Image (cartoon, rainbow, N blue to C red):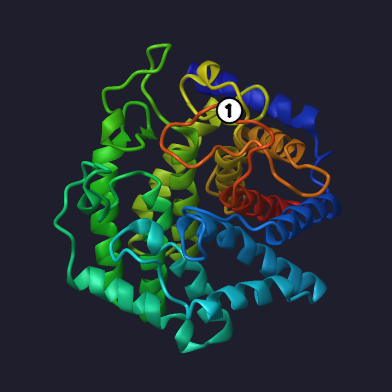
Amino acid sequence: MKRLIIYSILSVTALCSYGQSNFNKTEIKSIMKRVADWQIANPATGAEHDDLNWTYAALYMGMIDWAELTEKEDGDSQYYNWLLKIGRRNAWQMGKYMYHADFIAVGQIFLEMYQKYNDRNMMLPTLARTEFVINHPSASTLELDYRNMASLERWSWCDALFMAPPVYAKMYMLTNDWKYIEFMNREYKATYDYLFDKEEELFYRDHRYFKQKEANGKKVFWGRGNGWVLGGLCEILQTLPRNNMHRQFYQDLFVTLSNRIVRLQGKDGYWHASLLDPDSYPSPETSATGFIVYALAYGVNEGLLDKTVMMPAIEKGWQALVKAVEKDGKLGYVQPIGADPKKVTREMTEVYGAGAFLLAGNQIYKMVP
């Protein structure tokens, strides 16, 4: 209790000292446009970078929020048109693996496009994929093993909680069919029970990290992995109405995880690759930071999180993200693909980092009168 009181007092002091100097609508919108335009002009290629993969799905999630903002405020539909081209050239299909969470993540965007344009072709592939998975559920283990593809059929790594559950939440709201939320609840809670450390209030990346220790002797919890979870929770909470009977579990988890992770921000404003041993991973990491700032800002905007506690971290985090953007709009310091992070440099970028930046920026923009 004493620690909480001290932290709150420090937060109020920090809020006063930070002010709102970096929360200028024109500046926020300008840098978001630079990041979005650079990423569109510089598409990533190679492994795990086709249109329907998880890397681009994360970018689309940020891009669709940006598209909504620019169309509403500026009458600019170019970003929606970009998303339309991607959907049409892929016939609104999912990725190639039937059960793998990474290959259904694009369904989130396609379902939002369906809600906007009311074109059944935009949702039918996602409907078919989710129907099949629900009617033929995997009996695989949650013990992830990359030598055994069957172990990737369920949400056996925490990143999957961003990729798949929001698709089922959106299908539930579109159809009002109980089976979608029932499936999501069952599978999500199985992963939560397996990977969530109730003592540390953080998610392990997967079961291989249960007994591993960092150089400082602490448990191993990845920044971006927990950022993925928070981002996925934001999507679920934005989908389920406040009075929905299924919402409370996800809301409580969101608040718990947010209140834990806000205390792990580095002095430089970033959340680092390792949450409990940042000294071993001192490089800035913008994808983790982007998803976390997105979540904290969303929580404040929705009245779910304490503004006096969260705002100093949100401001610091946004300032850190902005510093990582080059003049041309390239976002640097994005941790490469892989479970085990290596050294992150300013030259490193990834499409999901830009997606996280746009998600965060949209929530920051909403904060400004």
Which residue reaches farthest front? 46
Q: Is residue 234 above or below residue 134?
A: above
Measuring from the top left, give residue 89's x and y in whole percent.
54, 78
Amino acid on which the number 1 mark rests in the picture: Gln
Which residue reaches farthest top? 216
Residue 113 appears in the rendering:
yes
User: Does residue 322 appear to the left or right of 109 in the view shown?
Assistant: right
Measuring from the top left, give residue 225's x and y in whole percent.
44, 40
User: Does residue 12 appear to the left or right of 228 in the view shown?
Assistant: right
Q: What secondary structure is found at the residue carrying circle 1? A: loop
Quadrant into which the C terminus falls:
bottom right
Q: Is residue 223 above or below residue 239?
A: above
Q: Is residue 253 above or below residue 115?
A: above
Q: Is residue 167 above or below residue 224?
A: below
| Location of residue 177 (image quadrant) | bottom left
Measuring from the top left, give residue 106's x and y in whole percent.
47, 66
102 vs 135, nearest the viewer: 102
Disc 1 target residue: 265
Around disc 1, counting alpha carbons within 10 Å, would you say few (fewer than 14), some (14 to 19), or many (20 or more)? Answer: many
Residue at image location 57% in from the left, 31% down from the top: 271
Residue at image location 14% in from the left, 57% down from the top: 139
Residue at image location 48% in from the left, 42% down from the top: 337
| Location of residue 200 (image quadrant) | top left
203 vs 126, nearest the viewer: 126
User: Does residue 362 appear to the left or right of 351 in the view shown?
Assistant: right
Measuring from the top left, give residue 352's x and y in whole percent.
56, 51
Residue 176 appears in the rendering:
no
Q: How many marks?
A: 1
